[in-house]
Image (cartoon, helix red, strand yellow):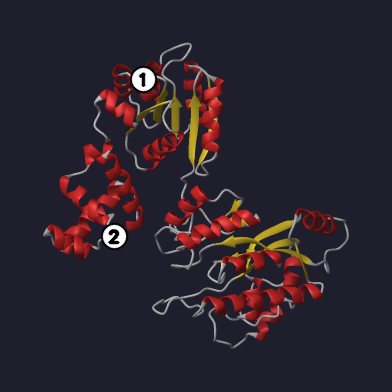
């Protein structure tokens, strides 16, 4: 069996830990006996001969060099230029391994096909070179975007914008906050060069922002499931499953095409009438059902009532050509989680799905709110004091400044902010600020 290892810090082990990876693991461990300069000395687990023994013929091999600010508690290089120089030393090691016949760089489809054929030709793999796809873990060492293009020219094919803590382009594990403008520019240049985005280590805020802004190839080379390892380093089960029921195939196709642009959603089924809606809701178990009101065999509110009675936890968003008050209230009374008309902005549909699933709130489009008299979610849930605090938060005022302006204690302001973050199911002030901008702009319109 030909095996691929999706993440190995080979050059860091060679250049920073001074491990000769051409030796066996036993030889490397023996050489480190008694050394205490780094943790886990004497416990090496990987070398090139051991990869061959395991029939691991292809690895995603990293360059890694973190820049750290003066007040950082995380170790790293004191300038991006030093970090870049370190990655070049690591690159030199990979090239040295190529010269020795130990490794071969895989940088395009043709080289991959040749390598796979060579490793699967039936001959012994004991002395065959291990293929490597070059990846950069953490983009701090990319001094400028011109450096990224230089890296692409020497074979870099994947980049993870962040590592641990705050970074120059994105925030990583154990930190919060969205990517800065430099990070977004990095994503655009990666997309232009067809470099893979490695989403590993991106904090939640940066992850979702990257999914919205990057349209190239994405992988997560070394992640676990948060359901198994409950830590922000791992991924949550937030990819939304969507079921579409509409009697017009063209409408279903349009919605599918829209949802396919959202990397946090996947369509698990579609139907053209009420009976199919009920069956698919049971067999496919979607997170949310997009349901038309007028179906050939039965009305949407009757389908809605059946689903609500049999699967009370399932979320249903009504998607209709009608915006009459009776239609809207009929769906709401039978358990719908939201209502949107088909002629409203397509991106509004994505916002509705995310609000219903991720925040657990009902969502009605501006037209539905206007025609039905239903108060908006924000009008239902925000107090006057909460509005005052959010208004100042989007002005980048600190808790201390907000407290002074509103005649409150800083502790009280922080309690309000925590309650607001809980209400909108976010873990960072940056995300809360973006939510506040959206909410308050709607209230002002």
Quick check: 103 left or right of 413? right
Which of the 4 quarters of the picture holds residue 298? top left
- Residue shown at 23% from the left, 55% from the top: 392
Which of the 4 quarters of the picture holds residue 416? bottom left
- Residue shown at 62% from the left, 74% from the top: 87
Q: Earlier in the sequence, mark 2 or mark 1?
A: 1
Q: Position of residue 409 (x, y in %)?
A: 14, 62
Quadrant where the image shows the N terminus: bottom right
Residue 358 visible from this viewpoint: yes
Q: Give the labeled residue for mark 2.
A: 396
Say if 368 sits above or below 434 in the image: above
- Residue shown at 58% from the left, 65% from the top: 145
Q: Position of residue 364 (x, y in %)?
A: 33, 31
* Badge 1: residue crowd in 10 Å (few <14, some 14–19, many ≥20): some
Q: Give the labeled residue for mark 1.
A: 305
Q: Of tags 2 and 1, which is closer to the observer? A: 2
Q: How many marks?
A: 2
Asked which secondary structure carries label 1, the reply is: helix
Q: Position of residue 96 (x, y in %)?
A: 76, 77
* Badge 2: residue crowd in 10 Å (few <14, some 14–19, many ≥20): few
157 or 392, nearer to the observer: 392
Say if 20 sits above or below 276 in the image: below
Quick check: 389 left or right of 77? left
Quick check: 126 left or right of 15? right
Which of the 4 quarters of the picture holds residue 249? top right
Mark seen at residue 98: none
């Amino acid at each position: 069996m030909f095996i691929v290892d999706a993440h190995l810090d080979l050059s860091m082990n060679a250049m920073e830990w001074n491990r000769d990876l051409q030796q066996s693991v036993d030889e490397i461990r023996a050489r480190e006996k008694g050394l205490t300069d780094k943790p886990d000395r004497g416990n090496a687990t990987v070398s090139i001969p051991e990869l061959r023994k395991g029939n691991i013929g292809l690895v995603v091999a990293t360059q890694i060099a973190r820049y750290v600010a003066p007040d950082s508690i995380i170790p790293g290089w004191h300038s991006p230029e030093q970090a870049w120089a370190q990655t070049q030393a690591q690159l030199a090691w990979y090239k040295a391994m190529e010269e020795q016949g130990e490794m071969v760089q895989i940088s395009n489809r043709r080289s991959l096909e040749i390598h796979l054929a060579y490793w699967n030709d039936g001959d012994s793999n004991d002395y065959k070179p291990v293929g490597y796809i070059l990846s950069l873990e953490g983009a701090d060492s990319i001094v400028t975007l011109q450096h990224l293009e230089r890296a692409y020219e020497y074979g870099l094919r994947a980049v993870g914008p962040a590592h641990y803590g705050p970074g120059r382009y994105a925030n990583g594990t154990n930190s919060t906050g969205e990517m800065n403008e430099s990070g977004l520019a990095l994503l655009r240049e990666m997309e232009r060069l067809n470099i893979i985005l490695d989403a590993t280590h991106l904090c939640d805020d940066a992850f979702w922002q990257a999914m919205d802004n990057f349209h190239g190839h994405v992988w997560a080379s070394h992640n676990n499931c948060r359901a198994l390892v409950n830590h922000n380093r791992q991924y949550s089960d937030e990819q939304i499953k969507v079921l579409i029921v509409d009697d017009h195939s063209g409408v279903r196709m349009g919605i599918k095409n829209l949802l396919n642009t959202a990397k946090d959603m996947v369509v698990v089924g579609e139907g053209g009438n009420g009976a199919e809606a009920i069956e698919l809701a049971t067999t496919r178990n979607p997170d949310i059902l997009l349901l038309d009101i007028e179906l050939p065999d039965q009305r949407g509110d009757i389908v809605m009532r059946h689903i609500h009675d049999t699967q009370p936890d399932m979320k249903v968003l009504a998607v209709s050509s009608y915006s009459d008050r009776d239609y809207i209230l009929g769906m709401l009374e039978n358990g719908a989680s939201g209502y949107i008309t088909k002629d409203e902005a397509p991106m509004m549909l994505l916002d509705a799905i995310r609000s219903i699933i991720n925040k657990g709130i009902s969502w009605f489009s501006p037209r539905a709110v206007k025609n039905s008299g239903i108060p908006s979610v924000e009008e239902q849930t925000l107090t006057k004091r909460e509005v005052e605090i959010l208004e100042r938060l989007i002005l980048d005022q600190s808790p201390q400044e907000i407290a002074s302006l509103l005649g409150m204690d800083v502790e009280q302001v922080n309690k309000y902010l925590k309650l607001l973050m809980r209400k909108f199911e976010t873990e960072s002030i940056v995300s809360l600020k973006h939510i506040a901008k959206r909410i308050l702009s709607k209230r002002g319109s």
